[in-house]
Image (spheres, rainbow, N blue to C red):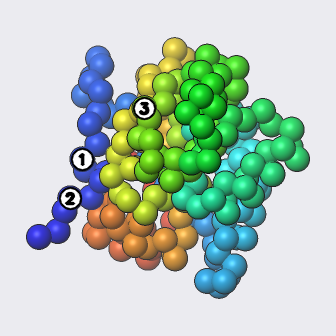
Amino acid sequence: MRQAASIDRIVWRVGLSDEPCVRQIYERFPVSTPSTVDDDRFRWFCKELWPRVHQSATAKGILIFVRSSYDFIRLRNFFRKEEVPICLNSEYLQTKEMQSAEAHFCAGRSRFMLYTERAHFYHRRHIKGVKDLVFYSLPEYARYYMELLNMVEESDSRASGDCNVMFSKYDRMQLDRVVGTTRVKKMMNSKNSTFVFC
């Protein structure tokens, strides 16, 4: 028997209305070949998604999730080059270092946190202060999507947070586990490249 997609099992916090707290924006980026998918993902993030996220008036408490250590290092180097102060949270940090990074992030001393799937796998920490999420890549384990989305807190300036998800036609398996088979077919075959779930 097939399990329900993670997107259907998210526990929404109910405020004044029964609307979900997080708007999920899926954006399909163009890919030349399977061998260039990592470079195409990085290029699209740097040119398209990052400028919007970084220049947003509410750019605070943004958790950027990456699946691989390779992507983590690549993005870390990009942020250093751009001189963007960012907290790093990976599986290689000691517990005290993780706690320190999370405290800086929660207090707003650092507006962004880069977080790896393996750090979540090993520690399953509930990170406080998350206002928005960016999935640079979808997790291998779909339940992590649900767990991370449920970390998003309401902001003082707006009732709902945003979750930006980057995907390509080669992310079909991860996407299927998160949004379900019916949705993934539409998302892969549509002329539109942006899909919003509320």
Left or right: 150 in relation to 35: left
Q: Under tag 3, what secondary structure?
A: loop
Tell me the residue at 55%/70% (across/down).
Answer: 168
Amino acid type shown at disc 3: His
Amino acid type shown at disc 2: Ala
Q: What residue did someone put label 2 on?
A: 4
Of badges 1 and 3, nearer the viewer stands 3
Q: Under tag 2, what secondary structure?
A: loop
Residue 156 pos. (x, y %): 52, 14
**Which is more toward the observer, 170 or 186?**
170
Q: Residue furthest left?
A: 1
Task: For residue 45, say whether it is visible.
Answer: no
- Label 1, label 3: how many angstroms apart (C-alpha)? 18 Å
Determine contact: label 1, label 2, CB under 8 Å: yes
Q: Under tag 1, what secondary structure?
A: helix
Label 1, residues with CA under 10 Å away: few <14, some 14-19, many ≥20: few
Give the mark nearest the N terminus, 1 or 2. 2
Residue 188 pos. (x, y %): 44, 73
Task: For residue 37, say whether it is visible.
Answer: yes
Residue 102 pos. (x, y %): 58, 27
Q: Is residue 37 above or below residue 107?
A: below
Tell me the residue at 52%/47% (across/down).
Answer: 119
Question: Which image quadrant is residue 11 in?
Answer: top left
Q: What residue did someone put label 3 on?
A: 126
Q: Is residue 111 above or below residue 64?
A: above
Question: Which circle marks residue 9 in the picture?
Answer: 1
